[in-house]
């Protein structure tokens, strides 16, 4: 049995040579990546041992960190906001304002932040996605193209 299949002219197929060359290049890249890996992982990294006088400050810092991490990020990103940063809603009557706020607090921003449109604008004034979406929503509510928020998230009860 021959190692390579010969074509009718008695030569090795050019496609077979290309496939073998690509395999060798990939194998070399994989082997080179192993040499760039750090020898120490984060789990085996040495930890700093605190002196007894540092523990009071550290305990307070840990308590603050725990309080922040216990706050559910999904609930925070979905919180209801009565004001939409950068948008003056005083020209809207109460019904139109409520329709705008319900949509702004229900629809998610598509920039990838995970916030509602109102929440994204509150946390990032430079987000072009939430700004454009909120402006289009406001224009639609003002023009009367959006008149009902039936089926959309309602204002939470206090």
Image (spheres, rainbow, N blue to C red):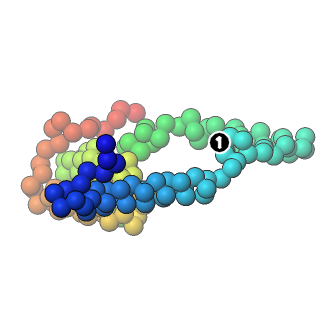
Q: Which quadrant of the rendered structure holds the C terminus?
A: top left
Question: Residue placed at 66% from the left, 45% from the top?
Answer: 41
The residue to which callout 1 is attached is 65
Drawn side of residue 28 relative to residue 149, left or right: right
Drawn side of residue 36 relative to residue 124, left or right: right
Q: Quadrant of residue 148?
A: top left
Is residue 112 at all visible to an observer of this figure? yes
Residue closer to the observer: 122 or 93: 122
Question: Residue placed at 57% from the left, 39% from the top?
Answer: 69
Residue closer to the observer: 53 or 48: 48
- The single residue placed furthest to the top in the displayed view is 157
Mark 1: give few (<14), some (14-19) or many (20+) Cα within 10 Å.
Answer: few
Question: Residue placed at 62% from the left, 38% from the top?
Answer: 67
- The single residue placed furthest to the left in the displayed view is 145
Drawn side of residue 73 relative to residue 133, left or right: right
Is residue 82 at all visible to an observer of this figure? no
User: In the image, residue 63 lies at what x, y percent?
Assistant: 69, 38
- SS for callout 1: helix
Whether 97 is drawn above or below 62: the answer is: below
Residue closer to the observer: 85 or 126: 126
């Amino acid at each position: 049995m021959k190692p390579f299949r010969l074509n009718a002219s008695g030569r090795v197929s050019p496609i077979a040579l290309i496939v073998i060359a690509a395999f060798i290049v990939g194998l070399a890249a994989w082997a080179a990546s192993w040499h760039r890996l750090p020898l120490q992982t984060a789990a085996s990294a040495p930890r700093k041992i605190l002196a007894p006088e540092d523990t009071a400050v550290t305990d307070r810092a840990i308590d603050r960190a725990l309080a922040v991490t216990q706050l559910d990020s999904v609930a925070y990103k979905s919180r209801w906001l009565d004001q939409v940063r950068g948008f003056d809603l005083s020209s809207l009557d109460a019904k139109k304002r409520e329709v705008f706020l319900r949509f702004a607090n229900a629809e998610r921003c598509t920039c990838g932040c995970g916030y509602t449109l109102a929440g994204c604008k509150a946390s990032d004034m430079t987000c072009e996605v939430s700004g454009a979406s909120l402006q289009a929503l406001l224009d639609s509510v003002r023009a009367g193209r959006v008149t009902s928020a039936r089926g959309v998230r309602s204002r939470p009860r206090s």
